[in-house]
Image (cartoon, rainbow, N blue to C red):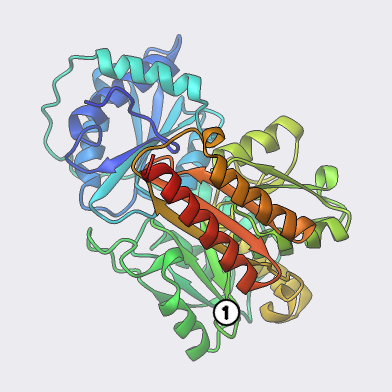
Amino acid sequence: MPHKLFGTDGIRGKYGEEPVTPATAAKLGRAVVDYFGGENKSPQIVIGRDTRESGSELESALIEGVTSRGGKVIRLGVVPTPTVAYITKVRSAAAGIVISASHNPYYDNGLKIFAADGYKLPDEVEKELEKSILADDYTFTSKIIADGAQNSNEYIEFAKESVGELSLKGMKIALDCANGAAYKLAPQIFRELGAEVEIINNQPNGKNINDNCGSQFLAGLQASTKEKNCDIGIAFDGDADRVIICDEKGKELNGDHILALSSLDLLEKDELIGKTVVVTEYSNLGLDKLLESRGVKVVRVLNGDRYVIEEMRKNGYILGGERSGHIIFGQLTTTGDGIIAALQIASLLKERNQSLSELASVLKEYSQVLLSVPVAEKKDLSELSMTQQAVEQAKEELADQGRVLIRYSGTEMKARVLVEGQSQTQVNKFANEIAQTWQKEVNNN
């Protein structure tokens, strides 16, 4: 087993290879009960999963691990990740565990944990759990446990109440459920709010989750939205903690567009606490320029929704997210929630009685290019004088009308180069020059 189990979002990897095995899942279940149980000898642990074929085996192992330490399981079956976070909080459970690899292919899987308050764990808690798992000699023995999932009605009602008394009657909405965790709940929620729903990719078979569908592959949704004359197209990823949308013409609108529309709406209603929005390093500079022109401060943090949430909680901000579609409405949720984010945009459309293309035109994105460069080793950036020179030259020419970001991938032997500016030709030129210089400097020395 690897010495380090937790990555940027829980434990994740190829199923059947450590650490994503039933044996490790059972030990995780035991560790979670020991850590979060406290004085309670039989703490409740919420467990939910997405639609991957390996989910049932990991679920059974988790249940065995939890019960072997005296814990009781609230088993939700197939539900979105944010549903587990919400149910953990409202049912006063000790913790929640999600079995999912999010937007990854079906052969991957993962385990992520929420504390009793519905928030993801800080690094120091993951390290304590890691120690317990690595020291545990428990042997997993169980077979697949027969299905007996509890309902998640509290989440369904919460989602509907998130738009107040507003009805979506008269709206036509296209949904791409990515053959994943939202395939039942999302259509139900939108229909119960009165919308006419056109659904694609809601026939999971264990292997087709995220397979050329969902938030990373929008072509099917874009076509369906146009052909069915829908007001909006909505695509979730495999565990529905992120969402990407398209307008009535089929044009893709990413997380930056959702943040732009939501922040301006909250600002107009005088509900944007601190007049601040939290984003990551990958959000487009056009978002900064738009919001700053309206008196809204943009705070950038490291890539990853957990860092967005940490910054929001620290300062009491209520809106933040990622370009990739993790959107956090802090007054409503404790984690990225694709269904809640989509409902906020749908309700905004209904309130304004404008087309989505009209509303979204307020954001003028800067040209952006992101390159991934294979590297033989990850040398300290401060030692790469030629690369730093190329970066500084690009920054000087772009001035305040662009930006440059370089870093190493956290999971691959690759360097990342992001350049933004007003001219696509100029952006491409700078990005390629930096990438080529970086690759040459690292690989030839």
How many marks on residues? 1
Where's residue 403, x and y in %? Answer: 68, 55
Residue 241 visible in the snapshot? no
* Vertical order, 27 against 189 (above or below): above
Q: Nearer the viewer, residue 308 or 392?
A: 392
Residue type at mark 1 is Lys
Q: Image quarter for residue 5? A: top left
Number of other residues with Cα within 10 Å of mark 1, as a class: few under 14, some 14 to 19, many 20 or more: some
Q: Residue furthest top?
A: 39
Identified at 46% across, 56% down, the residue is 436
* Vertical order, 40 against 432 (above or below): above
Identified at 73% across, 60% down, the residue is 398
* Vertical order, 99 against 359 (above or below): above
Where's residue 166, x and y in %? Answer: 70, 66
**Residue for badge 1:** 251
Identified at 44% across, 38% down, the residue is 9
- Is label 1 in a helix, a strand or a loop? loop
Q: Nearer the viewer, residue 332 or 312?
A: 312
Where's residue 83, x and y in %? Answer: 48, 46
Query: In the rendered image, which quarter contains the C terminus?
Result: top left
Q: Image quarter for residue 306? A: top right
Where's residue 309, x and y in %? Answer: 62, 38
Identified at 32% across, 41% down, the residue is 110
Looking at the image, residue 397 sits to the left or right of residue 6; the answer is right
Query: In the rendered image, which quarter contains the N terminus?
Result: top left
Q: Nearer the viewer, residue 301 or 330?
A: 301
Looking at the image, residue 402 sits to the left or right of residue 200; the answer is right
Residue 125 visible in the snapshot? yes
